[in-house]
Amino acid sequence: MPARGGAQLSRRLGQKKQRLLEAEQHQSPPDGAWTPSPREPSLGLPATPGPQRSIYFSSPQGRPARLGSEFFDQPAVSLARAFLGQVLVRQLDNGTELRGRIVETEAYLGPEDEAAHSRGGRQTPRNRSMFMEPGTLYVYLIYGMYFCMNVSSRGEGACVLLRALEPLGGLETMRQLRSTLRKGAAGRALRDRELCSGPSKLCQALAIDKSFDQRDLAKDKAVWLERGPPGPSEPVVVAAARVGIGHAGEWAHKPLRFYIQGSPWVSVVDRAAEQDVQA
């Protein structure tokens, strides 16, 4: 082939290749698919601002994600502290949602704890939930008429008692439930502060009864836990003695009750313990 003809052919091939490259660069991805840049990980979705939530626990309509099993899988003391500030949600059969921020808890450590229902490692039909997977509800009856709600934690027979909530949503329904279920003081309207300021009050206000025993708080459709919104500052947590366990010897004095200092929704304030925190 003459040198001139070869040069022309080579130039035409080069021009054709350049046109193909330009066409590919201007072509849109098929079906509107997002194509990551070489520096971005190929996640299948564009990056979005703000914290990312697990797809397994995300809620629709931009609502806070419910907390999953991994949240509950920690020792009782750390779980009791971690509960503070989180939001407990109860959905009634008619779709009404009752919501409250947890402000007070108590930790029960299992067989060694003389105040725990699992002391000595004993298992009964009543306390079986305490020995189940972390996040299992343990609901029991006291005084033959009131219920208390606990959540099992990591550790054989260990759990956390939910003692008080700050009501956030559904307050009028809570008031009606409390007025219907409480004993005495009939006819007196309950103040907001009285709705959930105690373990039995909390259960009345949320319509929690024995039927919730052994349910999984990470998966149940009628009751669940959501991460609470961050506050302007980190709340001060008070560690105080638990309430109503005078029979438990030295365990009655151990600082295994935790509450948010200054919260008006706490059931029992311990001034001495608060002074220790300030010191």
Image: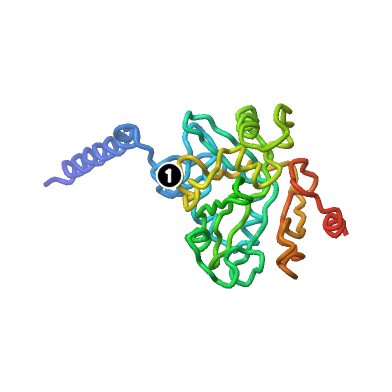
Q: Quadrant of the C terminus?
A: bottom right
What residue sits 61% from the left and 39% below the top?
Answer: 204
> Coloring scheme of the render?
rainbow
Residue type at tag 1: Ser
Camera-nearest residue between 44 and 268:
268
Q: For residue 115, which quarter of the picture?
A: bottom right
Residue 248 or residue 171, whichever sits in front: 248
Name the residue carrying label 1. 37
Residue 99 position within the rendered picture, expressed as x and y whole percent measured from the top left = 60, 36
Per the image, label 1 sits on a secondary structure element best described as: loop
Where is residue 26 drawn, in percent x and y?
34, 32
Q: What percent of the width, then of the height, locates residue 66?
A: 52, 44
Residue placed furthest toward the left: 1
Q: Is residue 273 above or below residue 112?
A: above
Q: Is residue 178 left or right of residue 29?
A: right
Q: Check disc 1: other Cα within 10 Å, few if <14, some if 14-19, many if 20+.
A: few
At x 49%, y 61%, the residue is 128
Looking at the rendering, which quadrant does residue 240 occupy? bottom right
From the viewer's perspective, tell me whether residue 260 is left or right of residue 33.
right
Q: Position of residue 5 (x, y in %)?
A: 16, 41
